[in-house]
Amino acid sequence: MPDTATPIPTRWVGPIRVRGNAVSGEVEVPLATYETPLWPSVGRGARVSRLVEDGITVTVVDERMARSILLVAPDAATAYAASLDIQGRIGELQGLVSTQSRFAKLIEVRDEIVGNLLYLRLEFTTGDASGHNMVTQAADLILDHLLAADPRLSYGSVSGNFCTDKKVSAVNGLLGRGKNVVAEILIPADLVAKQLRTTAARVVELNTRKNLVGGIAAGSLRSANAHYANMLLAFYLATGQDAANIVEGSQGITYAEARGEDLYFSCTLPNLIVGTVGNGKDLPVVEDAMVRLGCREDREPGANARRLAALVAASVLCGELSLMAAQTNPGELMAAHLRLERRRQDAGSVA
Amino acid sequence: MPDTATPIPTRWVGPIRVRGNAVSGEVEVPLATYETPLWPSVGRGARVSRLVEDGITVTVVDERMARSILLVAPDAATAYAASLDIQGRIGELQGLVSTQSRFAKLIEVRDEIVGNLLYLRLEFTTGDASGHNMVTQAADLILDHLLAADPRLSYGSVSGNFCTDKKVSAVNGLLGRGKNVVAEILIPADLVAKQLRTTAARVVELNTRKNLVGGIAAGSLRSANAHYANMLLAFYLATGQDAANIVEGSQGITYAEARGEDLYFSCTLPNLIVGTVGNGKDLPVVEDAMVRLGCREDREPGANARRLAALVAASVLCGELSLMAAQTNPGELMAAHLRLERRRQDAGSVA
Amino acid sequence: MPDTATPIPTRWVGPIRVRGNAVSGEVEVPLATYETPLWPSVGRGARVSRLVEDGITVTVVDERMARSILLVAPDAATAYAASLDIQGRIGELQGLVSTQSRFAKLIEVRDEIVGNLLYLRLEFTTGDASGHNMVTQAADLILDHLLAADPRLSYGSVSGNFCTDKKVSAVNGLLGRGKNVVAEILIPADLVAKQLRTTAARVVELNTRKNLVGGIAAGSLRSANAHYANMLLAFYLATGQDAANIVEGSQGITYAEARGEDLYFSCTLPNLIVGTVGNGKDLPVVEDAMVRLGCREDREPGANARRLAALVAASVLCGELSLMAAQTNPGELMAAHLRLERRRQDAGSVA
Amino acid sequence: MPDTATPIPTRWVGPIRVRGNAVSGEVEVPLATYETPLWPSVGRGARVSRLVEDGITVTVVDERMARSILLVAPDAATAYAASLDIQGRIGELQGLVSTQSRFAKLIEVRDEIVGNLLYLRLEFTTGDASGHNMVTQAADLILDHLLAADPRLSYGSVSGNFCTDKKVSAVNGLLGRGKNVVAEILIPADLVAKQLRTTAARVVELNTRKNLVGGIAAGSLRSANAHYANMLLAFYLATGQDAANIVEGSQGITYAEARGEDLYFSCTLPNLIVGTVGNGKDLPVVEDAMVRLGCREDREPGANARRLAALVAASVLCGELSLMAAQTNPGELMAAHLRLERRRQDAGSVA
């Protein structure tokens, strides 16, 4: 039992106009954060979305959850032979998983051999759950099964960091973990000028110099954006997600193009690890949030979670667009911050 | 004004026995998290710390906060000349900063030239604040000053992502941002056996195979640990920190050695961005937490924040040690989770 | 026509005793290098291999060559639809490739969507050629075909850097490019002592502290070794390979274990891009080298190239083992260098 | 003694028109490579340079060579104390180095503490040598000195991979190793059209989509270019460099801007490890190359090496510009390759 609760200031922002293969309509989103300038920032992006006929389009490109087990062989030759053998028994492993869970479905097993170490990355769909625990249980079962079946292999770890959870890596972006989502919008020139006080060319130029080149110079890894982590944290906390997953969630790419004077602006988020059921979702405030977000509807397994991921991505785009526009204008950002934060000593961050 | 608050379940865990150049004593720590198995996990590490005479030793190695501005020159030759010129005027810039803030002190300016783009990384100490806003204000001032002084330069961005805030990178670890802290403990063999149900050799082996080799195989970047992000998130939320900074905070290294049968276990966290004053710190629950943590004492500027960072690092070590020990034992982890989470569908994550 | 030739000093070293799924026997290897201390270094490893009954075991785990094309869609939704469509037409694309080349076989198409950009990573086997040009021709053909078939797509680039060739990345290691090879050896304690003047424990400790932890601290990416690049360069030059591929080739992992007092030592090289036919292979000296290496035998397509890759990996292990052993002994390395390089001002590198 | 020599086909290309803080004039450059399409590719860039009044401007921004030693302390607190102590004795260490070498000058010592491990990165200038061996000798001397002076420290390694040599990392780019050089050119619109058969807008767009976004998606690390490694390898081989250093040398950034219809194009190469004296430079063909390159003049120590680095960077720009221009045109690249390589089975690579 908790001793107490830490109340994170929360506001519903929007609505955001959004459509795509997982959501359609105008939806308000909850943001729990100590960094309250985030609310008007996302709010400005949401206003832009409502002024564009099609709003923000969100495409869910992939979904899976992974856990890597680590098996130890006497040598690489044996590890390789064992891996080939296991690849031939995927059906057997899928059957095994299905005996344990209605929702977890094993979709792929990838191997990575380093010396005599055999990392098996087990990839699942997990219905509407983010799936951390579901895949850990399944991995545990598979691990026992494989160890029992092959005396050449011994236990390394139930988690070999080739998963990888809540840690910076390239593996999640390249092999997939969580929902892979792209949010995008095409903003007419007059809205860019009036609502964002900038031009398409200036946003594109800033994105190239700051997010792309600046990020590369900083030694970033599959990450080129201004502040995805801010929106992710706030949304995740308000909806009972395991917010430590913003570590990999923040590894996404902002890409913009000037199309004539109009602005094409996109946020690609390959690692949104979110769910509508499971741990953290039973708190009343979270339950209310899910209902209000339209994520408690009677849909096929996984559809509510995809809707949630789409709304997360749309929220990220709103906040990213607003900050990027602000940073094209010298002085605007700090002036806005000072206005909002007048009484604070250290008012938070602008990324 | 917030519409509401999201109450994050919170428990005080410990006390942790800790000493070092920023803290000494036995201190309980607050953890706000939806992943409640974290509490007994950190609690087990804390118990171990109390059973070791010296407890956990924490060394604060460095502290600074950075903001990078982006200036645009016509070409690299000009950018280089401008940078040399600026390096010769650090004293002038330091004076400028001191007119604005009592606490922000400019300690270093680093340049990075890419083509005609000049990224200046301004590094400050910021007293007891984490310093996000303080350095942004200072950067804004310096930016205006440099642009006024040198007509060859034009505005690029108040933040060029060479800072870099809440984003995965190598720059923060290598050049420093936040508190650079090492927590370590030397655990006698009998405690390793009785409290952690493992051996030093097995912990070292797992660390090598999972955190080091597994992390490398996963394409990690300056990151080799099991689940720092979990402890960081919980501690940051409970103490009003900007928890999006767990993105870079989680980029740390677990290193262990077997010393005979005893276990040397360390967590190196180069990027703890925390403060005891500033944004998020004015909530009553946060104020109470600061008092209880001993971070509201009358010390020289920065000392309370260093104490806080040391306690964060000690908490990370407790949770990391406990999980690593558990993963040396097949099945232990899942059994513990299931016991704690029996009624949940998806019980969270074990990293 | 060349104006001249740059003669790189070359020596045949060994023989190396080697076995595995692509080679078996004792084979001398050619090393072309300005860094002549490399010869005795690899030579020492080769001597160890001959003193171990099974020698070095080399396992070829995977082989493929990739080229990524870049298609541009109006938006992500269209890019995603196009990608799904293409995935359904792999058979058609395979047929197309087979009309152009006897050896190139399309085995997989992977997509990566960033905003409206669609990167397609085309993966092939290429017989005994390294395959650079073969896959570029095939990619060109496929690109034309896809653009003709789908008016929603436009040309981005024949190479979108998601391949990626001769550049540092995580994608090649995780998705595969070139031969993925593990070389390993189990060295009895007495040989470790007598031939390498060290112990298994000291080699393991050094590997952990230098290659693993040191590499992580340095911000390495999927790379943890002492000096793979040296052996790769020398072998590649002597056998007519495109030696710029040492960039990704050098991203490999050294992993060692103490098994009692014996030393298990392995080198995992996921990206060996080598061939026995094609560009650079028609020079007489290269032809001679191929014959002497046993890579001009009448085997199934690809077998000669796999043999070559196995010999490369074995050579890398020899040099890595020798240098690692030397670095366990303070002063040994520099003394050896000075002895070998007495008359030189700047004698090369020890990594 | 070598058994033989591997003759790498070599051609002098250019001249390149170049100016800057290390070179000025028109200079031909030698390229030793099996990938002979490289010659006309660099040649085209050189022709463009001669048609622009100012040619290519090259700025050498920094130079240093590093070697990291690894010291082991009982704990981090001791490592930190030792490091502080060493920082206070830089003058003493500089004096020590000067007793050994006329050319090696210690300019900075940086520490990195991971647990109880203390990595000291010793940074030097090394005159006209690339400095591998010079810094290894100096590091050896300093290591002995420090171990003798402080009984709390023990030997870890003469090279702790925090240097880092011939390996992928972020540390070299961020802290500096080798010459940090920017090459740039401003090409009038008519030359872009006539000589490169493209437009500034198309080159910029391709650079963004391929080198920047494509590279980020591929999980690159401080690397965004098309094929730096090709030019580096060819130039390094022809001038007796340790060409394994193309691994880090290839980690550079191509950045382009459209200035009206004109094209600004730049290549930033932070890690050019080259020298005009030392190992590999005593071969007659290399000596001739140095003379012809104007790198055997009587200049202050270091000036010939900086000139060489500037010429390397200019050559990289020529090849990069040519390939990037070609890739803006569907089909041009393969057509050019096929024309050049008609009789070859596998003609090399286009990056």
Image (cartoon, coloured by chain):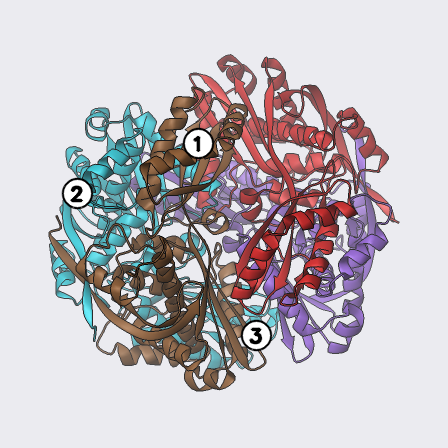
Chain colours: A red, B purple, C brown, D cyan
Above-or-below relation of C80 to A261? below
Q: Are marks 3 and 1 in contact (CB under 8 Å)?
A: no
Q: Secondary structure at mark 1?
A: helix
From where the camera sits, is residue D67 visible?
yes
Q: Which residue is mark 2?
A: D16
- Residue B16 falls in image quadrant: bottom right
Query: In the shown orientation, is residue C72 left or right of residue D10?
Result: right
Above-or-below relation of A27 to B199? above
Q: Amino acid at mark 1?
A: Glu
Task: Choose between C321 and C136: the one closer to the eye.
Answer: C136
Residue D79 pos. (x, y %): 56, 70
Q: Which residue is mark 3?
A: D73
Distance between mark 3 and mark 1 Cα atoms = 62 Å
Residue at 28% x, 51% y is D232
From where the camera sits, is residue B148 visible?
no
**Dot 2 alpha-carbon crowd within 10 angstroms: few under 14, some 14 to 19, many 20 or more:** many
Which part of the image, by quadrant, shows the C terminus of chain A? top right
Task: Choose between A67 and C294: the one closer to the eye.
Answer: C294
Q: Secondary structure at mark 3?
A: loop
**Dot 1 alpha-carbon crowd within 10 angstroms: few under 14, some 14 to 19, many 20 or more:** few
Residue D260 pos. (x, y %): 30, 23
Q: Are marks 1 and 2 in contact (CB under 8 Å)?
A: no
Q: Amino acid at mark 3?
A: Ala
Residue C28 pos. (x, y %): 31, 72
Residue at 69% x, 79% y is B261
